[in-house]
Amino acid sequence: MNYVVNKMNKSEKIFVIGHKNPDTDSICSALAYAFFKKAKGKNVIAARAGEVCDETRFVLDYFKVKEPVLIKDAIGKKLILVDHTNPSQAVDNVEEADIIEIIDHHRLEGLETKSPLFARIEPVGSSATIVADMFFSDNIKMDKTIAGLLLSALLSDTIIFRAVTTTEKDKKIAKRLAEIAGLDPEKFGVEIKKAGSSIKTKTEREIIESDFKLFDSMKLGVGQIQIVDNTEINERKEKILKEMEKMRLEKNCKTLMLMVTNILAQDTDLWIVGETAAAEKAFKEKVKNNSIYLKGVMSRKKQIIPPLREVLLKEGAL
Ligand SMILES: [Mn+2]
């Protein structure tokens, strides 16, 4: 099926578009909302502001849907923004576009528009939740494909209902979408997340560097990789540790860590090379096989760096 191509009057074309570095919510909400507007007789085309990621590729292939058209510049275009409002995340020159609608679930920041607009912003787990709700309340018929796309986006953004942003409304809407699509949300959600977090094609260095931050004053480097199944990465642990030690020397760090974060189990296996004393104090746990297991820990910024910083401050190392 093709939800992208539109044969109506070119001059009235409206693009519905998500943010740059598009995630599954940005792509699938745009596709579904374009379908919704077309059902209401509007000439709306789904667009994207960048390349689709592995997870989204899996979803589009699964439902045999073509990716939305790529837009690199917004000058002079009529746009509906989904899944963002911040101009810094938007397609280039969004200030020069005519924004006629917004559908989003983030806080409002930094956007000015040329004219009054229709905006629907709700504190729910995904933009797809809002789009689905609009289909249901306006009685617009939704086929299996649209339901599947919206369900995928909802499951992706809420990390299969585990994210703190998940609401009762998300769960209710997901149930309805799953019934139409004929899918089991939990099982299908894991498939989506697996497809998006495979490390098969990544080198050890790429795994460590995929989300890596240096904390110069602490002589510390911390990477993070998000996975749904620890088996694959554990099989490569020795090689990854070796590469971590190499990187530690290159970057002149005392300690180098890799957070192996399982987003389903909601835990982190913290892999460590170099000095480990501060980490043992900070997390009140002995390092075994270069790791400390941390239940409930997912955030580097909130749960890893502050306790380490505190220990180093106490010891006068900062
Ligand atoms: Mn979203």
Image (cartoon, rainbow, N blue to C red):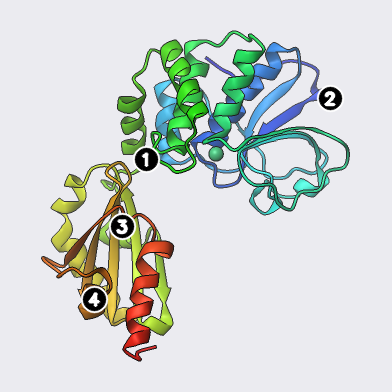
Q: Which mark is residue 207?
A: 3
| Residue toward you, 275 or 61 | 275
Q: Which mark is residue 11?
A: 2
**Residue occupying the far right of the picture:** 115
Residue at the image point whose x is 35% and y is 82% from the top:
219
Q: How many neighbours does mark 2 have within 10 angstroms: few (below 14), some (14-19), or many (20 or more)?
A: few
| Residue 81 spot, x, y in % from top left | 69, 37
- Residue 196 is labelled as 1
* Marks 1/4: CA–CA distance: 34 Å
Distance of label 3 from label 1 (alpha carbons):
14 Å
Q: Residue at x 41, y 74 (%)?
A: 214
Q: Secondary structure at mark 3?
A: helix
Q: Secondary structure at mark 4?
A: helix
In contact (CB < 8 Å): disc 3 and disc 1? no
Of the residues tagged 2 and 4, which is closer to the observer?
4
In terms of sequence position, does the residue under pointer 3 or pointer 4 come before the other?
3
Crowding at dot 3, Cα within 10 Å, few <14 / some 14-19 / many 20+, comes out as: many
- What's the CA distance linking mark 2 and mark 3? 46 Å
Residue positioned most to the bottom: 316
Nearer to us: label 1 or label 2 = 1
Q: Calculate the distance from the C-alpha at mark 2 to the C-alpha at mark 4.
A: 65 Å
Q: Amino acid at mark 2?
A: Ser
